[in-house]
Image (cartoon, coloured by chain):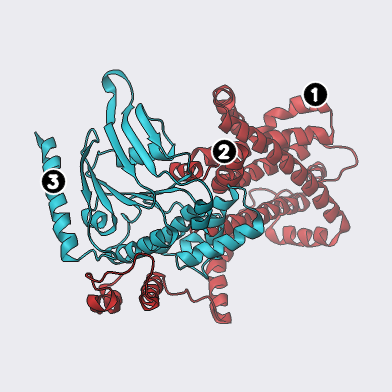
Chain colours: A red, B cyan
């Protein structure tokens, strides 16, 4: 803070506020002195607080912000489409196998207008959400248990990380043996893919709770479950959220692999439709569904990022 | 509120530290942090504990707060509650300012409506009325430390320990917070053990200034401060006593050069 902002307080003659020799009865402070003290504190607070940020943005400023984040994305998409078009034009593969972007766009328009498409998205998203929630529940319980009990950590701490790095497709043969071609087989693999990330996020969040906060918890008398509820879990939240985000990515990947391998009769999921498009050599349809998968992935990521940003803003880890 | 509670209940006994030693580790690597430290704080007294680095000030506070166990000797707080304030405010970022005060009340089983009422009162006491809904990061360092003080007051402890609470603040803020702590100490009839390495701060605030030696920590002097309150940190009488104490402290520090 620049020195001149403190001048008003410092130029005040010391004798006027509190003469050093003045003696007062121990439990009686004149009201005038109190007001001055209150003013000093209030004045210092005002000076120390940063001037309020300009929150009322004009419509033009909003547009400028949106444009600033939008044009690089638009440019990247345009470049990717151009490269794709060039490959098609080069004649590397026949057009019925590698269609140009315009064909895929037309196909995409058609499927988005059909009711079947929404049925497929619904089936797939229901599997994703159920699997993910189950993984969150299991991962959270395992995470707390491992963070809390030392022998358990020694026993399965590194196993969790091992599971996390395992390609989920490895589990499908076992899942099919155990559950046949069923929803359970897919769910099994989705949960196995996501739960270790969720558990690991929570464990590292708990490990990195600042020791000073733990001491504050001790001083405030936080023990047992109250310590977890009011201190350790909220403190671990940022790391937990990034574990959730990673867990979602793993469960989405596992689900896509699962839907290609485990076609449950009567469920025309996104994966089942992709596989069908390949069987019928309908390249535009196949690529349209790939775009759908990509877009869903991006949308969910946006949601997670919004949650993460809101959290960091509350904690003051973000400026603006 | 606190005063009447106390008057109704048992008389507070203050703090008695008797021949306390603290050793960290064992065998050859063992470190003697505190050696035969004895001191008392009477109810309502403001005692400053002063020492250079390595005098075990913070260790002593941890022992008194019950966060650590003594190796020898005894710490007697008369069974009263003890609260501890740190150099960092250490507020919880997931709670609002009022929430940070309320959490101390919640841990004592105070119900919700009463928590809200008392937190509002306490924020008023530290002159932060109107800031309850803010987040800690929206406040300045001095304001956060006042929230931490309000949180400590919410514990309604019989003994308030302060571990260099203003060490990280600029001089102007510290000066004003000295006035504030003195005012609150008086209004609420607190018993305070205040650790600092700032000699003038100790003389500005303390009824007594206790000087600790370094490595191991021992009580080497106990200066009564017979100066009228409120004192100013730049008053000549404060400077005079601070000068005397600083001399003694320098002698103690240079002892370690040999």
Give the quadrant of residue B21. top left
Residue at the spot of label 3:
B248
Q: CA distance from mark 2 to mark 1?
A: 46 Å
Residue at the spot of label 2:
A223
- Kindly indicate whether the residues beneath marks 1 and 3 are on one polypeptide chain: no
Question: Foreground residue, A70 or B20?
Answer: B20
Across and down, in percent, residue A2 comes to 28, 72
Give the quadrant of residue A275. top right
Question: Foreground residue, A88 or A203?
Answer: A203
Give the quadrant of residue A267. top right
Q: Is residue A7 visible?
A: yes
Residue at the spot of label 1:
A177
Q: Mark 3 or mark 2, which is nearer to you?
A: 3
Q: Mark 2 or mark 1, which is nearer to you?
A: 2
What kind of element bears circle 1?
A: helix
Quadrant placement of the N terminus of chain A: bottom left
Across and down, in percent, residue A239 comes to 55, 45
Q: CA distance from mark 1 to mark 3?
A: 81 Å
What kind of element bears circle 3?
A: helix
Q: Mark 1 or mark 3, which is nearer to you?
A: 3
Across and down, in percent, residue B25 comes to 33, 24
- Kindly indicate whether the residues beneath marks 2 and 1 are on one polypeptide chain: yes
Label 2 marks a residue whose chain is: A
């Amino acid at each position: 803070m620049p020195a001149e902002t403190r001048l008003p307080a410092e130029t005040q003659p010391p004798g006027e506020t509190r003469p050093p020799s003045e003696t007062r009865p121990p439990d009686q402070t004149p009201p005038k002195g109190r007001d001055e003290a209150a003013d000093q504190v209030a004045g210092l607070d005002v000076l120390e607080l940063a001037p309020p940020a300009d929150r009322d943005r004009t419509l033009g400023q909003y547009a400028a912000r949106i444009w600033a984040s939008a044009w690089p994305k638009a440019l990247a998409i345009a470049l990717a489409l151009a490269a794709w078009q060039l490959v098609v034009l080069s004649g590397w593969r026949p057009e019925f196998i590698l269609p140009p972007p315009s064909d895929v766009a037309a196909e995409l328009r058609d499927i988005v207008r059909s009711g079947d498409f929404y049925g497929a998205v619904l089936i797939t998203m229901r599997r994703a959400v159920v699997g993910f929630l189950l993984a969150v529940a299991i991962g959270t319980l395992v995470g707390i248990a491992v963070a809390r009990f030392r022998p358990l950590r020694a026993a399965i701490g590194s196993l969790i990380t091992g599971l996390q790095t395992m390609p989920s497709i490895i589990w499908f043969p076992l899942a099919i043996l155990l559950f046949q071609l069923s929803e359970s087989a897919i769910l099994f693999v989705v949960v196995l893919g996501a739960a270790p990330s969720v558990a690991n996020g929570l464990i590292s969040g708990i490990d990195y709770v600042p020791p000073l906060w733990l001491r504050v918890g001790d001083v405030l008398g936080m023990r047992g479950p109250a310590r977890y509820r009011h201190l350790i879990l909220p403190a671990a939240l940022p790391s937990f959220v990034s574990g959730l985000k990673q867990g979602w990515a793993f469960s989405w990947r596992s689900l896509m692999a699962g839907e290609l391998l485990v076609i449950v009769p009567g469920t025309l999921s996104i994966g089942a439709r992709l596989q069908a498009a390949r069987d019928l050599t309908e390249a535009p349809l196949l690529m349209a569904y790939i775009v759908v998968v990509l877009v869903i992935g991006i949308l969910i990521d946006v949601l997670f990022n919004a949650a993460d940003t809101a959290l960091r803003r509350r904690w003051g880890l973000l400026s603006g | 509120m606190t005063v009447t509670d106390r008057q109704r209940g048992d008389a507070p006994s203050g703090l008695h530290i008797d021949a306390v030693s603290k050793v960290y580790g064992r065998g050859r690597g063992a470190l003697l942090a505190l050696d035969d430290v004895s001191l008392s704080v009477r109810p309502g007294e403001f005692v400053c504990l002063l020492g250079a680095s390595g005098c075990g000030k913070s260790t002593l506070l941890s022992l008194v707060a019950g966060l650590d166990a003594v190796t020898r000797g005894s710490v007697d707080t008369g069974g009263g509650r003890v609260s501890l304030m740190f150099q960092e405010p250490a507020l919880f970022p997931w709670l609002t300012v009022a929430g940070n005060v309320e959490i101390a009340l919640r841990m004592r089983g105070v119900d919700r409506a009463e928590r809200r009422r008392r937190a509002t009162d306490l924020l008023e006491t530290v002159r932060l009325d109107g800031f309850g809904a803010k987040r800690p990061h929206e406040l300045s360092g001095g304001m956060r430390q006042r929230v931490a003080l309000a949180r400590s007051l919410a514990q309604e402890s019989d003994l308030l320990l302060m571990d260099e609470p203003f060490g990280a603040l600029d001089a102007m803020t510290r000066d004003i917070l000295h006035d504030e702590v003195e005012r609150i100490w008086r209004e609420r009839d607190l018993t305070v053990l205040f650790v600092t390495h700032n000699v003038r701060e100790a003389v500005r605030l303390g009824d007594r200034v206790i000087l600790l030696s370094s490595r191991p920590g021992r009580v080497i002097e106990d200066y009564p401060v017979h100066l009228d309150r409120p004192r100013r940190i730049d008053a000549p009488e404060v400077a005079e006593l601070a000068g005397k104490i600083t001399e003694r402290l320098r002698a103690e520090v240079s002892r370690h050069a040999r």
